[in-house]
Image (cartoon, rainbow, N blue to C red):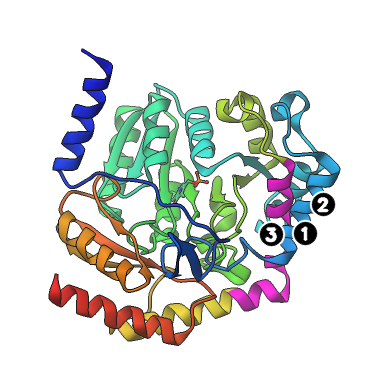
């Protein structure tokens, strides 16, 4: 088949399904307000929950690293790409998360793809929540392990998968993979119950805290901290590009876990180290989070969450992600476009990020949002939903 014809045909089918995507260019730092296409928009689409991406301390740390270490790492971590900025970041993360060690990756996607296949192979069983992020699903598939998926947060089904796995694969390693805050629904995993269950069956637990870090727990240490089960989780993963305002991701756990991953995680071994500037910015963010200012920012975010929930007439939002379910992909897009025209940047999320027919607006709030724009947003959503 002709290559161009293939590409155009594929794009036409995506378009016909109302699922065509395109890029938008932002002309300002990330923040509660952003510049886009010559306009200022109130930004309800960012994962920069604590407003750290443009924080002077992160910028200064990055600038210093840039002067001292240059623009790029130049090699993989295992060759000559490990700079003191990487080491410092990992020490700071381990201290902050209260674990023996931490290892960083260039992205959350890379962390998942490196860690899960290193821990489980084709003789093993990986059990995932149905709403797990694409990178966790891809990682589980890549591992070649036997896969089982349980309905979202369904403990009884998770238990029956664990029982089945123990009976059918008595020699296998069992790895349970979940998020602590689910990225498109903003709800929480019943983490404590899942920890109890995996312990009962001798399984290991991988928890992705991408949207909980900086949001939940003391100083934003995450849901594992909030529920006081961090020391019972084998693999705690999180990202540095969301609430931490920089980029990359971490895995926290034992010193042996870190050593093992350095020797086994292919996305770590066969990839150029993240630029020292990024590690330096992330390190500044972790240090800041541990200070009073970090605690204050997490507290302010909790207030914004409560304010938005009140305005929407709902119970308090469990996280900084507040979805407004719409259903039809077309309608969700139309509502999002109308909000855009009124100066509100609220993305519509649709298949394949969420199930078909479960399209939604995904509002994310940050410390920079004050009451007035929140009120404006809620009125605009109500109006659009009536009119579209
Ligand atoms: C964003 C996200 C990732 C990927 O992290 P990146 O650093 O953006 O690659 C992984 N897991 C979850 C739950 C996420 O939301």
Quarter of the figure with the C terminus: bottom left
Residue 285 vs residue 37, the one in the foreground: 37
The number of numbered discs placed on residues in the rendered structure image is 3
Q: CA distance from mark 2 to mark 3?
A: 17 Å
Q: Which mark is residue 64?
A: 2
Tag 1 residue: 60
Q: Residue at x 25, y 61 (%)?
A: 360
Residue 296 vs residue 93, the one in the foreground: 296
Residue 190, horizontal then vertical, whole percent: 38, 61
Q: CA distance from mark 2 to mark 1?
A: 6 Å
Please name the predominant secondary structure of the magenta segment in the image: helix
Q: Earlier in the sequence, mark 1 or mark 3?
A: 1
Badge 2: residue crowd in 10 Å (few <14, some 14–19, many ≥20): some
Q: Which mark is residue 286?
A: 3
Residue 361, horizontal then vertical, whole percent: 28, 64
Q: Residue at x 33, y 41 (%)?
A: 162
Residue 300, horizontal then vertical, whole percent: 56, 80
Q: Is residue 263 left or right of residue 109?
A: right
SS of the residue at dot 1?
helix
Q: Is the CB of mark 1 within 8 Å of ligand 1? A: no
Badge 3: residue crowd in 10 Å (few <14, some 14–19, many ≥20): many
Instruction: Confirm or deny contact between disc 2 and disc 1 (CB under 8 A).
Output: yes
Q: Is the CB of mark 2 within 8 Å of ligand 1? A: no
Q: Residue at x 59, y 45 (%)?
A: 248
């Amino acid at each position: 088949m002709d290559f161009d014809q293939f590409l155009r045909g594929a794009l036409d089918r995506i378009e016909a399904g109302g699922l065509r995507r395109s890029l938008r260019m932002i002309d300002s730092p990330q923040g509660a307000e952003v510049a886009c296409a010559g306009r200022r928009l109130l930004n309800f689409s960012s994962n920069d929950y604590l407003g750290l991406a443009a924080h002077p301390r992160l910028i200064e740390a990055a600038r210093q690293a840039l002067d001292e270490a240059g623009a790029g790492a130049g090699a993989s971590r295992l060759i000559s790409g490990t700079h003191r900025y990487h080491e410092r970041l990992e020490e700071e993360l381990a201290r902050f998360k209260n674990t023996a060690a931490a290892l960083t990756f260039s992205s959350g996607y890379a962390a998942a793809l490196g860690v899960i296949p290193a821990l489980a192979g084709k003789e093993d069983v990986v059990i995932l929540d149905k709403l797990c992020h694409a990178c966790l699903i891809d990682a589980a598939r890549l591992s070649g392990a036997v896969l089982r998926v349980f309905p979202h947060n369904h403990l009884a089904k998770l238990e029956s998968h664990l029982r089945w796995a123990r009976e059918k694969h008595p020699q296998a390693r069992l790895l349970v993979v979940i998020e602590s805050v689910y990225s498109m629904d903003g709800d929480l995993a019943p983490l404590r119950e899942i920890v109890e269950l995996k312990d009962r069956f001798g399984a290991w637990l991988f928890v992705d805290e991408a949207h909980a870090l900086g949001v939940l727990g003391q100083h934003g240490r995450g849901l594992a901290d909030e529920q006081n089960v961090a020391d019972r989780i084998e693999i705690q993963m999180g990202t540095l590009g969301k609430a931490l305002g920089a980029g990359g991701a971490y895995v926290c756990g034992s010193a042996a876990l870190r050593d093992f991953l350095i020797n086994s995680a292919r996305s770590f071994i066969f990839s150029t180290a993240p630029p020292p500037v990024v590690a330096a910015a992330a390190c500044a963010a972790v240090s800041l989070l541990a200070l009073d200012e970090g605690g204050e920012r997490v507290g302010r975010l909790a207030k914004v969450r409560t304010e938005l929930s009140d305005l929407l007439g709902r119970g308090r939002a469990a996280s900084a992600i507040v979805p407004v379910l719409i259903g039809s992909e077309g309608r969700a897009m139309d509502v999002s476009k109308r909000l855009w025209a009124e100066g509100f940047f609220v993305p519509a999320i649709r298949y394949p990020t969420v199930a078909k027919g479960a399209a939604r607006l995904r509002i994310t709030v940050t410390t920079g949002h004050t009451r007035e724009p929140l009120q404006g947003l809620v009125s605009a959503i109500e109006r659009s939903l009536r009119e579209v």
